[in-house]
């Protein structure tokens, strides 16, 4: 495979002035006719005519009406062209039904749909498939389907025929087409300037009852983007389509978002509170891309974080505004540590803006997305809210209609603030998680914090330099009152000290409030100080963080020395649990334990080889100890969390069910499942039903409920995904691989469906002790299935390979077993470039 470098960027030799596409749909032989107006690009020096194209059968081609015979390879074509402007016409045949990779034009349950980002358009027709080539598209569709959709506004909509015109120039990756027997859930939105926009959510017949929530989320997103970012929608219609076979969550195609049905369809009976929250966030994310991604797009794929980091940042602001900001921040940091930190600290580490790649689809990562969003959060903290808003206004004004770079993005901030952001830019170019060590000193009424930052050298960043780190700090006095409200320290040197004068007593510091930078904080803190912050910190994030640290430290001791559960942790948690003034969702997060893989990472970092079984045992023991410690308050918590009246996935009810779910899992450790069984029997919504089922399975019970659940939901694919996933998530370590293997024999294990594959094999990779079973059965089973899926769907295969990225943490026996599986995958004949790149990088 070929490696592409950022430094090699050159513009395309031609501008595309207009694109006219005609689709004649047929499952195995769709014809695509293109008529494209090209003109020499005055900015370019290389004027060779090259069009990308993959898996296309060329029927005919013409330039200015004269037939031509281009030189065709597996990757594209070249052809001599006249000087000046010309019209390229071409007809190709493609096979949507045979397209199991779900990239380009493919079929899902009889409906046609597309996925073009990043480089799928070249599987539809010959084209300069690169994001800096933007054009106006007109799309004509012929097919025997009641619904025929593409981007932009409809011009003709008749039986078997439709024409769509998108007036906004766009790159090909934002092209979309959908055709099928779909029904619409419709609504409308009036924009701030008074324009009415038709909104439609298209679903398969039978799914109409799962649309209302997504539609409400869309309207809230449209409203929010007007109010907070001043961004108005720009077409007459906004369509969303739900599709069952999809490689990721959703796609922001202009005016025609395509969604994995799991990321948009929900009803109280079939979706959990977590599903509703995720749907709301993804709808917002894709909608927000209309400005950050579509109106302003990326010059090349190295700039992916330009749209993804910013759009993740925007959707997190949206969720914080609609729900609890503290809960959102904590959840985001949990997610960052679970997914981004291992990536940044292992063989797959890459900068937020990578400098090279083989397969771009392998770079839709937690680093580009979530660390990319953290970098924007830091920028906003450094320049302040008002200048952030001015910089964004300038960004939209200056770059609307363009394909941009990170340099363009930082320039608007420099212009608005007169700051030099050269050092800040290292956040985009250096891979790895910085470590921030802190030492404190108290003398004559002055309290000093001495910081030192270090970034471990890696293959991606061999010579790391100090970064700008915004450190939010507050100081508490020994009574727990704040003596210094939150202040932002701006660290720019490798080592730097900050002094606070005129204090009456030695304060207790609360450092990195709100997780003000994506770093690992190293500080020697005693349990007493952690307990103090858990009880008193006024910053909700750091208060949670103190509890988290106590949990981590006690679990590490339990897993390595067999120490008993720490009293400071148990007492501190009990006090939090009892505090009815605290948001139940916040208390629920407090009660959550660090994940077992997070503990494995912490142990490895501390120089101890993690033992997955011991970690699992410690987590179980701590949960039981917590249950016993909280025994007296649990009934009151359960009562407090009971929700009366009809189900609503709003913050109030969701919070209660979150805490109630935690409480039920503790109670189950004491009553063996009596109350969980009762909740299961009485549940009238999926949140309560599924949490009860999980408790029962964790207690080694629930076989009757598992069977009943299947009978009840066998016709609902999204619920059956949960049925697969829950049995695996709750499997005890030495049974996990056997249970997964048995489930892969189930008649409903449709492994070509990415959601089902993820619900099964993906769930295995998330059962830490099960996946890492000492006999290697988890590794073997995953490798078997990755080898089987790769020729069918390289993208989903390659993505799941990252389950192996942490392999160097474990003992030599496990490492050698994983090494054997990596070798077996790597040596598979015909392995896709996607998976080859991932396995090569992971092996290091
Ligand atoms: N932009 C798409 C992701 C495309 C992934 C291609 N492998 C969804 C999103 O980030 O909103
Ligand atoms: Zn996105």
Image (cartoon, helix red, strand yellow):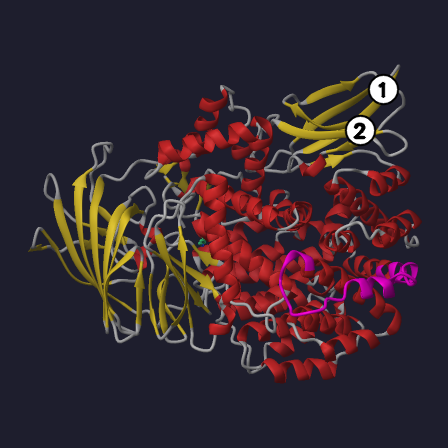
Residue named by callout 1: 503
Total count of labels: 2
Residue named by callout 2: 475
Residue 199 image point, x, y percent: 39, 60
Mark 1 surroundings within 10 Å by alpha-carbon count, few (fewer than 14), some (14 through 19), many (20 or more): some
Residue 397 image point, x, y percent: 37, 33
| Residue 592 drawn in magenta | no
Dividing the picture into quarters, in which one does residue 593 lie? bottom right
Q: Is mark 1 within 8 Å of ligand 2?
A: no
Is residue 371 visible in this depiction of the protein?
A: yes
Q: Is residue 594 left or right of residue 35?
A: right
Give the camera-side residue of 679 and 114: 679
Q: Which residue is situated farthest in the left direction here?
A: 66
| Residue at figure coordinates x 57%, y 50% from the top left | 842
| Residue at figure coordinates x 41%, y 75% from the top left | 109
Q: Dot 1: what SS?
A: loop
Residue 258 image point, x, y percent: 42, 61
Q: Is residue 365 left or right of residue 339?
A: left
Residue 220 image point, x, y percent: 50, 53
Q: What stretch is highlighted in magenta?
A: 623-652
Q: Are marks 2 and 1 in contact (CB under 8 Å)?
A: yes
Q: In this view, does 776 lie to the left or right of 82?
A: right
User: Where residue 551 is drawn, which disc sits there?
Assistant: none
């Amino acid at each position: 495979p070929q490696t592409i470098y950022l430094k090699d960027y050159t513009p395309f030799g031609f501008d595309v002035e207009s694109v006219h596409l005609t689709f004649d749909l047929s499952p195995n032989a769709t014809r695509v006719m293109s008529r494209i107006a090209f003109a020499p690009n005055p900015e370019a020096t290389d004027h060779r005519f090259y069009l990308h194209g993959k898996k296309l059968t060329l029927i005919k081609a013409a330039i200015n009406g004269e037939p031509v015979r281009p030189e065709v390879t597996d990757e594209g074509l070249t052809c001599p062209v006249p000087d000046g402007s010309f019209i390229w016409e071409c007809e190709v045949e493609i096979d949507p039904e045979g397209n199991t990779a779900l990239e380009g034009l493919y079929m899902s349950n009889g409906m046609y749909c597309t996925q073009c980002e990043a480089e799928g358009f070249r599987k539809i027709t010959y084209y300069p498939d690169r994001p800096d080539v933007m054009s106006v598209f007109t799309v004509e569709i012929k097919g025997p389907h009641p619904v025929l959709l593409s981007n932009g506004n409809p011009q003709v909509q008749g039986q078997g025929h439709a024409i769509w015109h998108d007036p906004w120039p766009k790159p090909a990756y934002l092209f979309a087409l959908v055709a099928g027997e779909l029904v619409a859930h419709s609504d409308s939105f009036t924009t701030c300037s008074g324009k009415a926009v038709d909104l439609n959510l298209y679903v398969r017949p039978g799914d109409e009852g799962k649309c209302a929530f997504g539609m409400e989320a869309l309207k809230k997103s449209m409203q929010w983007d007007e109010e907070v970012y001043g961004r108005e929608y720009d077409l007459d219609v906004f369509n969303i389509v739900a599709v069952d076979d999809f490689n990721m969550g959703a796609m922001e195609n202009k005016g025609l978002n395509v969604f994995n049905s799991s990321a948009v369809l929900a009803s109280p009976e079939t979706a959990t509170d977590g599903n509703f929250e995720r749907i709301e966030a993804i709808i917002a994310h894709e909608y927000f891309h209309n400005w950050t991604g579509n109106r302003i797009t990326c010059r090349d794929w190295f700039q992916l974080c330009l749209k993804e980091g910013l759009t993740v940042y925007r959707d997190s602001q949206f969720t914080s505004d609609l729900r609890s900001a503290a809960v959102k921040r904590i959840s985001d940091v949990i997610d960052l540590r679970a997914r981004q930190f291992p990536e940044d600290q292992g063989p797959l580490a890459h900068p937020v803006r990578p400098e090279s790649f083989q397969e771009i689809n392998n770079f839709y990562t937690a680093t580009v997305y979530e660390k990319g969003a953290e970098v924007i959060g830091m920028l906003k903290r450094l320049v302040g809210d008002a200048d952030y808003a001015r910089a964004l206004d300038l960004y939209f004004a200056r770059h609307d209609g363009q394909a941009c770079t990170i340099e363009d993005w930082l320039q608007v901030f420099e212009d608005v603030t007169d700051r030099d952001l050269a050092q800040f830019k290292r956040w985009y170019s250096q891979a790895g998680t910085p470590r921030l060590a802190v030492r404190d000193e108290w003398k004559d009424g002055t309290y000093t914090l001495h910081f030192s930052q270090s970034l471990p050298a890696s293959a991606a960043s061999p010579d790391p330099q100090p970064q700008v780190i915004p450190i939010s700090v507050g100081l508490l006095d020994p009574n727990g009152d704040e003596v210094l409200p939150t202040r932002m320290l701006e660290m720019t040197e490798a080592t730097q000290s900050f002094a606070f004068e005129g204090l009456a007593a030695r304060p207790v510091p609360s450092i990195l409030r709100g997780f003000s930078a994506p770093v690992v904080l190293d500080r020697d803190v005693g349990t007493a100080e952690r307990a103090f912050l858990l009880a008193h910190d006024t910053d909700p994030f750091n208060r949670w963080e103190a509890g988290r640290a106590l949990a981590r430290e006690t679990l590490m001791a339990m897993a390595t020395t067999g120490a008993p559960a720490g009293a400071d942790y148990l007492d501190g948690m009990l006090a939090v649990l009892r505090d009815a003034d605290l948001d139940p969702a916040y208390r629920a997060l407090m009660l959550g334990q660090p994940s077992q893989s997070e503990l494995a990472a912490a142990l490895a970092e501390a120089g101890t080889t993690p033992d997955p079984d011991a970690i699992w045992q410690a987590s179980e023991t701590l949960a039981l100890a917590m249950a016993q410690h909280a025994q007296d308050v649990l009934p009151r918590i359960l009562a407090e969390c009971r929700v009366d009246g009809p189900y609503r996935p709003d913050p109030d009810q969701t919070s209660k069910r979150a805490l109630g779910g935690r409480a039920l899992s503790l109670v189950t450790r004491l009553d063996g499942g009596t109350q969980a069984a009762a909740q299961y029997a009485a549940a009238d919504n999926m949140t309560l039903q599924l949490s009860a089922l999980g408790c029962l399975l964790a207690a080694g019970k629930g076989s009757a409920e598992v069977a009943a659940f299947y009978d009840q939901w066998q016709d609902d694919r999204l619920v059956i995904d949960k049925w697969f996933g829950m049995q695996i998530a709750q499997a005890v370590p030495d049974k996990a691989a056997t249970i997964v293997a048995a489930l892969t024999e189930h008649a409903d294990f449709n492994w070509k469906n990415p959601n089902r594959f993820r619900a099964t094999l993906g769930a295995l990779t998330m059962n830490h002790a099960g996946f890492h079973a000492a006999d290697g059965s988890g590794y073997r089973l995953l490798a078997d299935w990755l080898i089987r899926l790769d020729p069918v769907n390289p993208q989903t295969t390659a993505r799941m390979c990252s389950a192996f990225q942490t392999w160097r943490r474990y003992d030599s026996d496990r490492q050698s077993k994983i090494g054997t599986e990596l070798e077996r995958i790597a040596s598979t004949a015909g392995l896709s470039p996607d998976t080859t790149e991932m396995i090569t990088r992971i092996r290091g």
